[in-house]
Amino acid sequence: MAALKQTQSVENKHKLSNTLRNWLPILHSSLSDLGAAMAPFVESNPVIEVTSGYEEDFEKKIPRKIISSSVSNSRTEHIEALTIQNKSLYEVLDEQIGKPLFPTPLSQKIATFVISNLDENGYYEGESEKFCEQNALRLDEFEKVRLRFAHVEPIGIGAKDLAESFMFQLDNSDISDAAYSLATTVINDLQGIHSYSNEEHFSEVMHVLGTFKNPPSIEFQEESAQIIPDLMIYFNEDDAIEVKLNDAYYPTIVIDTNYGVEHDFISQKIKEAKSLVDALDMRKATLYKVGLMIVEYQYAFFTGGAIMPLTLKTLADEFGHNPSTISRAIANKYIACERGTLAMKEFFTTAIDEDVSNAAIKDFLRGLVKNESHARPLSDMKLLDLIQDNFKVIMVRRTIAKYRKQLNIAGSSERKKLYQLH
């Protein structure tokens, strides 16, 4: 009897380990990448048939109250946009590595290096000298190829800075020959832009510069918000808050248990298929529980208030997991609610003090910049003073600079240049 119990214990442990092995990549992936995360398990298993969840009717997936909500988040104008699947910036760029711009293996290698060293705004920040040393290449040869990005879509990508990006865009604009020379001068002296206001073609230059994309990757930054939420949180007709899994997007797994062949291989594949189903169910259960706990701790946000301090450790203790496990679980996951769509990680903040979260401070900072004087933008020190006065906390200037960069807000001098342009 003891031997039987021991055997059952080993079998149960083996089954659990299989499920966990499948569960981790499935839990960590975003809902839009779930199919790709499952692919290795599906492709090697002949007894599994998977139906994509993307073919369902959109109206059945997102609650009407969220769709019709008049309140939107800055990251998305319409919840409907969440279903749009567009190419990423890197996919668009990769498609252009080849003839006619990059016809040789070396030019393609340089182009790939440039693309892999773009920052979030689309500017090139790679170590060109190091690349040249490793490839026995002169810097001017490298630059000759990099400058071909002036003809790559979206125009402006691959430039080293704002001025070069504007030059790329200028060479692809409809500016007149008479105004071109002034435009190059203005681009290279944006700080003193108004000293050229009496020049003959100044108004045409300003009009053309006003059409340029800044940063050059801006269209793709907007598209990156078009994601698929894992959870919907909203108030139902009875004014009770409801947490709903977006399970209509989940793939449906069908296991053929009547495969027609009695064989150990088939039996094993059926076990693996059931383990995959268990893993998918564990993903749903985990994220649903996270959603319930977010509602419990952040109820004020869903009724119009601010996001309150909440650490990953708090949730990890509730789950009995390590905070790093919870961190991976919420990565690339989104929640759609009546206030818009937010990354799940935004509900977890580091407390500045007992009552103030860094999310609240970031929102306040964003509002200050939005309403600042275009003639005299607020410096980081002034922002620091205003934030400390409003929240009654002690901070340092570099923290404000860090928050500003996280919000993709330029420094005060750069903002002043952009205000003058537009």
Image: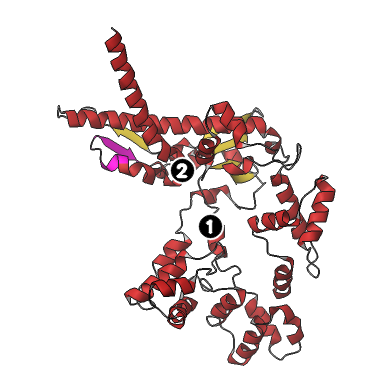
Assess disc 2: are there few (<14), some (14-19) or many (≥20) residues with their C-alpha within 10 Å of its C-alpha.
Answer: many
Name the residue type under label 1.
Glu
Which residue: 67% across, 56% down?
Answer: 402
Assess disc 1: are there few (<14), some (14-19) or many (≥20) residues with their C-alpha within 10 Å of its C-alpha.
Answer: some
Q: Position of residue 334 (x, y in %)?
A: 55, 43
Please state which of residues 90 and 47 is positioned toward the viewer in this rendering. Answer: 90
| Residue 174 makes an appearance in the image | yes
Q: Secondary structure at mark 1?
A: helix
Which residue: 51% across, 65% down?
Answer: 118
In the image: residue 408, left or right of residue 8 = right
Residue 270 magenta-drawn? no
Q: Are marks 2 and 1 in contact (CB under 8 Å)?
A: no
- Where, by quadrant of the figure, is residue 206 drawn? bottom right
Q: Position of residue 396 (x, y in %)?
A: 76, 53
Considering every residue shown, the one lying at the far top of the view is 1
Please state which of residues 105 and 29 is positioned toward the viewer in this rendering. Answer: 105
Q: Is residue 111 above or below residue 40?
A: below
Q: Position of residue 338 (x, y in %)?
A: 64, 41
Q: Gap between marks 2 and 1, in whole Å?
A: 16 Å
Magenta region: 41-51
| Residue 259 makes an appearance in the image | no
Residue 44 magenta-drawn? yes
Q: Position of residue 120 (x, y in %)?
A: 55, 61
Name the residue type under label 2.
Leu
Q: Secondary structure at mark 2?
A: helix
* Quarter of the figure that contains the N terminus: top left
In the image: residue 134, left or right of residue 81 = left
Q: Is residue 220 above or below residue 334?
A: below
The residue that disc 1 covers is 223
The residue that disc 2 covers is 31
